[in-house]
Amino acid sequence: MNTEITWQVKTFSELTTDELYDLLKLRIDVFVVEQTCYYPDLDDLDRHPDTLHLFCYQESKMTAYLRILAKQVCYPDHPAIGRVIVAQDQRGSGLGHQLFAKALNVCQHVFPNEVIKISAQQHLANFYQQHGFKQCSEMYLEDGIPHISMIQTPR
């Protein structure tokens, strides 16, 4: 199925009520319900004035989302990408790679020559390695799920 994808990048104050609802619903559907991970998703980082929300719609449904956090919002020395998510029915379609490539383009534009850091679910390390990330920590548990820290140095 080839549907048109509409990508957007917005700050919290630019999000419409429907977009905010859709991104929270997608995050809860996957992180809380599907992964049975009960954690405080509303951490005030979404509405930080420097946080960028990158997402797409396909046929009026939000199918991919992530947030980009400026240096000192999540990590003291690095901008970060987090809450990376693709709707279950779109996994394996390449949408995750499109999402992440777009995120890295935004980071390069907004944070030129900065090292980007992520906290990745360990089983997704290969996905992030395909985008130039390298593991920089031992495995640790975050909300009961094995994670690793990864960084990408500017190309």
Image (tube, helix red, strand yellow):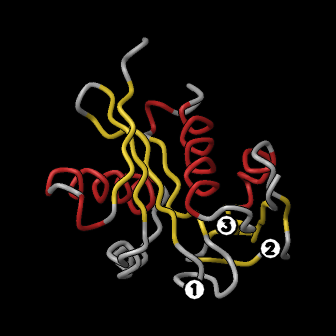
Bin the neighbour count of mark 1 within 10 Å (Cα to Cα): few under 14, some 14-19, many 20 and up: few
> What residue do we see at 78% from left, 60% from top?
152
> The N terminus is located in which quarter?
top left
> Sequence-wise, which precedes: disc 2 or disc 3?
3
The residue that disc 2 covers is 139
Q: Are marks 2 and 3 in contact (CB under 8 Å)?
A: no
Horizontal side of residue 72 vs 1, given as left or right: right
Find residue 49 and report its horizontal and vertical position in percent.
Answer: 35, 76
Labelled disc at residue 118: 3
Query: Residue 85 versus residue 55: which sits nearer the camera?
Result: 55
Relative to 116, say whether 131 is above or below: above
How far separated are the C-alphas under marks 2 and 3? 13 Å
Residue lying at the far left in this picture: please name it. 17
Disc 1 versus disc 3: nearer the observer: 1
Describe the element under mark 3 as helix, strand or loop. strand
Describe the element under mark 1 as helix, strand or loop. loop
The residue that disc 1 covers is 72
The residue type indicated by label 1 comes to Gln
Find residue 69 and report its horizontal and vertical position in percent.
Answer: 52, 71
